[in-house]
Image (cartoon, rainbow, N blue to C red):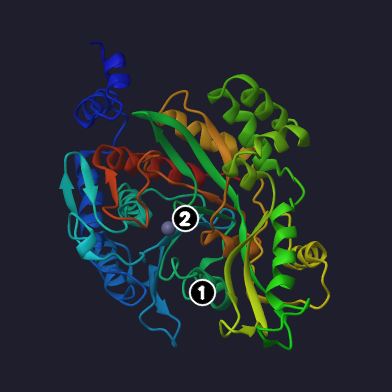
């Protein structure tokens, strides 16, 4: 069996798959640099950085690494919101020649909770087995944190002086909203992280599918998140004498109308470019529709939107997620409330969405409340100059791989820097198996060999974007 066919046959068969991957070795860092990244990852995985535990210990561990690597203490700033001292931030600077505003990396250190009883291996430890590294945060995003830290240490050792400063913010609280991390830094310490460009390895995708690299997605935008409560009220009464007025029925009529409503299709630059490039992986009418969406064809987008994943790319969505009504089985309801969860395109606003919902429900007696307000997050433009840098660095690692801009349906800390007017882009380095996504889940893991090559990619991307004349 040739290596190429072995790679295809290896799909689903771990041993063959791993062998094929090893054969297709990408450029990687020196063994010493790879060992540094791995040691940092192991150290971070062993520290519980859930919101409850905070990030003080992880920040101290990283700071020691940077001190040992020769970073002056003045370039290592540790700070936290005085009201939340457990949510510690570390700002590391690699000084440049001062040409242009700094390049800022966003690296959250916190992780979502993990119950040891649900896991095969201890969640708060690094376990390497059968070509994988297991541990809570390995893919989201301590593997990336370790690679960014190791790249900085390598640049320092090589006495590399970038054109502009490279600043890395290692932050807490991304998984619980980011208000003590990037949100707080942007509001209170903008001077420390003011930048011309943000790279966020938490966003974007190195996509691995069927045992091979499929594409590289540069996250340029994300949907924002807003939640409404809508309430119907009534005077109530005895259930033995029903009347036509009824809070449950009144709300149900509106919900029925919402279920049939479609928000208008709006094709952003990112989504058009995404489909234009994604089309090559499809065939037939789906391929033709994707190409047409690339050219702004709204009807083609409507056909694609039959698939919920595509639907989320081309329009704002709102959906009923919770209901609460009535107070006794033998009483007419005095109150009925629904929770409506919306994901807004970057071109949409909370106010406009609420106005649309009120129009759809068409019932002035209903009371609307915003229970979670949106953080508006404009699209960072996928300019030709920017995409060319990604193309160049990706192709230096993986020749011919398709690079495309992408919009995430979820949210990352980039929402804060985008809202602050700093163009922000995904910079994921570790390829993730699309058939084996475990971020936030049980037995979270990354492939050891993909982690290792990702270290070299992170180094090259950091160097490229901190050079002179970069976007
Ligand atoms: Zn994350």
Q: Secondary structure at mark 2?
A: loop
Quadrant of the image occupied by residue 373? bottom right
Name the foreground residue: 259 vs 194: 259
Q: Position of residue 180 (x, y in %)?
A: 47, 76
Q: Quadrant of the C terminus?
A: top right
Q: Position of residue 406 (x, y in %)?
A: 58, 43
Q: Is residue 247 above or below residue 28?
A: below
Question: Which comes before the other along the chain, label 1 or label 2?
Answer: 2
Q: Nearer the viewer, mark 1 or mark 2?
A: 1
**Residue located at (68% from left, 28% from top):** 289
Disc 1 residue crowd, few under 14, some 14–19, many 20+, Cα 10 Å? some
Image-quarter location of ligand 1: bottom left
Quadrant of the image occupied by residue 351? bottom right
The residue to which callout 1 is attached is 179
Observer able to see residue 311: yes
Left or right: 189 with respect to 297? left
Q: Position of residue 146 (x, y in %)?
A: 31, 54
**Residue located at (32% from left, 20% from top):** 8
Q: Is residue 181 above or below residue 284?
A: below
**Residue located at (72% from left, 38% from top):** 302
The residue to which callout 2 is attached is 96
How many tags in the picture? 2
The Cα atoms of the two marked residues, 1 and 2, are separated by 29 Å
Q: Secondary structure at mark 1?
A: loop
Q: Quadrant of the N terminus?
A: top left
Disc 2 residue crowd, few under 14, some 14–19, many 20+, Cα 10 Å? some
Name the foreground residue: 305 vs 246: 246
Observer able to see residue 94: no
Quadrant of the image occupied by residue 130? top left
């Amino acid at each position: 069996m040739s290596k190429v066919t072995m790679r295809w046959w290896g799909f689903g068969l771990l041993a063959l798959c791993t062998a094929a991957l090893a054969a297709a070795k990408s450029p990687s860092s020196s063994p010493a640099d790879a060992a540094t990244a791995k040691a940092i990852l192991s150290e971070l995985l062993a520290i519980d950085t859930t919101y409850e535990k905070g990030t003080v210990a992880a920040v101290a561990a990283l700071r020691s690494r940077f001190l040992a690597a020769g970073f002056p203490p003045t370039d290592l700033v540790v700070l936290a919101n005085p009201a939340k001292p457990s949510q510690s931030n570390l700002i590391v600077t690699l000084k440049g020649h001062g040409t242009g505003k700094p390049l800022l990396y966003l690296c959250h250190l916190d992780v979502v909770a993990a119950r040891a009883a649900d896991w095969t291996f201890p969640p708060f430890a690094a376990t390497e087995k059968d070509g994988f590294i297991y541990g809570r945060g390995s893919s989201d995003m301590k593997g990336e944190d370790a690679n960014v830290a190791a790249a900085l240490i390598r640049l320092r050792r090589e006495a590399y002086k970038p054109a502009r400063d490279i600043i890395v913010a290692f932050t807490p609280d991304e998984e619980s909203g980011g208000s003590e991390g990037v949100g707080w830094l942007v509001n209170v310490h903008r001077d420390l992280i003011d930048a011309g460009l943000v790279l966020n390895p938490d966003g974007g995708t190195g996509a691995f599918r069927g045992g091979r690299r499929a594409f590289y997605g540069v996250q340029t935008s994300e949907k924002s998140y807003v939640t409404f409560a809508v309430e119907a009220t009534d005077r109530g009464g005895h259930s033995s004498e029903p009347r036509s007025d009824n809070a449950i029925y009144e709300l149900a009529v509106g919900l029925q109308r919402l279920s049939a409503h479609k928000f208008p299709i709006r094709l952003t630059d990112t989504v058009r470019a995404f489909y234009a490039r994604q089309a090559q992986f499809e065939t037939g009418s789906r391929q033709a529709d994707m190409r047409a969406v690339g050219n702004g064809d709204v009807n083609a987008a409507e056909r694609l939107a039959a698939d919920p994943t595509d639907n989320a790319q081309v329009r704002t969505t709102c959906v009923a997620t919770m209901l609460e009504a009535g107070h006794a089985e033998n009483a007419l309801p005095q109150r009925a409330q629904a929770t409506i969860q919306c994901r807004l395109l970057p071109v949409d606003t909370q106010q406009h969405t609420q106005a649309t919902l009120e129009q759809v429900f068409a019932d002035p007696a209903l009371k609307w409340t915003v229970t979670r307000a949106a953080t508006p997050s404009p699209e960072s433009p996928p300019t030709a100059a920017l995409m060319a840098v990604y193309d160049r660095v990706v192709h230096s690692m993986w020749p011919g791989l398709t690079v495309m801009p992408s919009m995430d349906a979820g949210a990352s800390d980039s929402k804060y820097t985008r809202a602050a007017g700093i163009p922000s882009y995904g910079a994921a380095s570790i390829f993730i198996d699309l058939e084996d996504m475990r971020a936030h889940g049980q037995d979270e893991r990354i492939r050891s060999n993909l982690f290792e090559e990702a270290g070299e990619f992170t180094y090259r991307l950091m160097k490229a974007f901190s050079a002179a004349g970069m976007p």
